[in-house]
Each structure stands twice: as C-alpha cells, then as structure tokens.
Image (cartoon, rainbow, N blue to C red):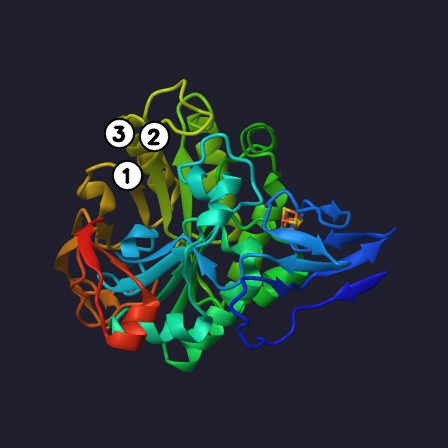
Amino acid sequence: METVVHDPPAAFSGDGSKVGGWWHTSQGRVVCDLCPRACSLHEGQAGFCFVRRNEGGKLVLTTYGKSTGFCVDPVEKKPLNHFYPGTSVLSFGTAGCNLGCKFCQNWEISKSRQVLEILSRRADPGEIARAAALLGCEGVAFTYNDPVIWAEYAIDCASACRELGLKAIAVTAGYICPEPRAAFFRVMDAANVDLKGFTESFYAHYTLSHLQPVLDTLQWIKADGHTWLEITNLVIPGANDELADIERMCTWILDHLGPDVPLHFTAFHPDFRLRDRPPTPPATLAAARARAMALGMHYVYTGNVADVPGQSTYCPQCKQRLIERVGYDITRYDLCTGKCRYCQYPIAGFFREQPGSWGTRRMVVDPSSVVGRGAIGREGRA
Ligand code: SF4
C-alpha cells in the first residue's frame, strides 16, 4: 500500500488541478483517504464528491484555485456569533460535496456537475489573503460547499491568511478521516460544524453518510482546543425535529463538548429533493432553543428567521442580554474585556472591546481586481 500525505503548498499552477493528499493505491485503483467514503477510483474516475479524480494513477483535486465566486459577508452569517462579532469575512466556495443531503440548500454548486464548467473565478491562496486584508476583513471563510473535499486549497489559503494575521474559518459538515482532520483543523481558527441530526438513520437516509465520524470531528476539535467551535443544526419538519432527538443531541454536546459551545437551530426551506414539506415553523426553533437552554447549554440561537431574542447573546450567570442582534446588525454590545458588563462572567469566544460594524451588507468581489487595481465590488443585503 502506498500512502501519500499532503505536501506543503506548491506553486499555484493556475490550471485548477493539483495532486492531492491522503490517498493510496490498491489493486490498480486510487483509494481516497480524505473522507469516510473511501472512494476507490479507476483511471479517469471521479469520487462521490466529483472533484477528486484518478488521473494517471494519482489522486488529483480538480478544483484547486477555482471558485464559484467571492463575497464579503458578516461573520454571523457563517454562522459564528462568538468570533469577533460584527466583522466581515471574505467568503468563497468551489464545487462538489462528499455528502448527499436531500435537503441541500446549496445544491447548485454542491451537486451540479455542470458547475465545474462555470468555476469562473480563479485565485491563488496568497491573492485571496491579500484581498481579504485590503478589504478590511477579519479573515477568510471556506463555505458555500464543504471545504473538506478541497482541503489542500483551503489549507493553503488558511496558511496564507496566517502570514497576514488574518483568521481562517471553515464551514463544514465535519465528515473527514482522522489524519486529514488534524491537518485541516489545525490551520483553522474557527469552524461551524453542521450537525445535521442525531440519529444514524437520519444521516443514512437524508445525507447518505454516517453520524459517528461527525461526532468524532466535534470531539477532536474540542479536545485539540485550537479552533473556536460553533454548531449548526438545520431543523427539518418531519425529519429531525423530534424534541426527544434534539434533547439527546444537546445532552451529548453537554457531556462531550461542554455548555459553552454555541448551538444554532436554523430553519429549513424546501429545496433540492426535499420539497414535500413546509419551512420550519419559528415555534419549532424556539422550542428547540428553550429545551437546549433548559438542559444547561449557555449559548443557543435560532437562525434563518427574524427573532431578535433568539439571536441575541445572554450572560449565562445574570441573564442580561449582552449582544443584541437585529438580523446581522449589532444593536447592543455590553461586554468588557470579554466579560459580562454587569456581573463580569466570562463569555466564551473571541471578542474585541467594540464590535465590528459590517452589519448586513453582502458584497461581491473579485480578489484579482481588489489586489491588482484596488477595485471594490457590488454591495447588496445579506
Ligand atoms: S473526498 Fe471525495 S473522492 Fe475522497 S473519499 Fe470523500 S467523496 Fe470520495
């Protein structure tokens, strides 16, 4: 068995392909060791994620240096509520996914093979980091599709960010094998991990993957202690909205990760192959949040709905509302040196004395233009 580990960043070739890490050969095939699917690929064949391919007996990442586009977003949109609130992050994704979620909210880029032909934006890691710095961003977020499947590109970008004092953020389902897990998360300053449900049957039926590797990732991040961790749970009517399951999930989080990991219950909207059920009622999210907090979780939020109380941060000790959010706008910020201004209880996370003021803006940018000409892109509402 030949095992190849990830090399240090190579010079960017610009052709969108790079020999990847974490694979071995077996019986004339290339076996990908990046995620638990362990795709075994014959010559020319792509994996389940359709971006990692056997080319000439080597595993190649075909989307290195390519993107579907870049936007400056509020960090709260990732969502991260305890990581430099109010700041902006340069966000981008590529194509493909290693899960098969029937409810995917980004399926145009995660599941459409045609997207490979329209990966129009090209940017090398150094250029992305420089653009983020010029734009005044706190860092760069690897999002829109799961960065695990383009780990080499994300790692190189994170390393380039670190050289400029910027933060690297991963938005991921956490479905990754142990060796690449360590390499990937050790360069990430923050991560939002999507815990999609809390039963193996849900994971198998709705995501075509398994629960345990995701739980392993969550525990690894927490134990390693290097990456700030928040969790998202998309609540889908009739699929994973049983309060008993939500209670089991919260109990597991409390037992294995502790009460300080922020948890976001977000609303489902009918999409992709799951259009036969309604959007999540706000009352369902509120009930999940109330149950999680009753069990002892300190920071629980609702998402994808208008809910100022459910999206604000409270002191776990004196219960004062410390960070009030109206959408992505911060309208109250009662922290002092990261502690509650009223009772000095330390709030988990990373906070400055003043929040950022990026608000709800969403700005499409082209890193090449930003770096080359200082051009700034179109602004919109997130
Ligand atoms: S990363 Fe892609 S190619 Fe590799 S095992 Fe997972 S789905 Fe298969």
Q: Quick check: is the Cβ at mark 2 less than 8 Å away from ligand 1?
A: no
Say if residue 133 shows up in the picture.
no
Give the number of the disc on residue 269: 2
- Residue that sits furthest to the bottom in the current view: 163
- Disc 1 packing (10 Å; few <14; some 14–19; many ≥20): some
Q: Is residue 285 left or right of residue 332?
A: right
- Tell me which label, 1 or 3, sits earlier in the chain: 3
The residues tagged by marks 1 and 3 sit, at their Cα atoms, a distance apart of 9 Å
Give the labeled residue for mark 1.
Answer: 304
Q: Which mark is residue 282?
A: 3
Give the residue furthest to the right.
Answer: 27
Whether residue 239 is situated above or below residue 354 in the rendered picture? above
Q: Which mark is residue 285?
A: none
Q: Name the spot of residue 334 as percent of width and height, x first.
A: 15, 62
In primary-sequence order, the first of circles 1 and 2 is 2
Q: Tell me the element at label 2.
A: loop
- Ranked by sequence position, the earlier of labels 3 and 2 is 2
Mark 1 residue type? Asn
When asked about the image quadrant of residue 91, the answer is bottom left
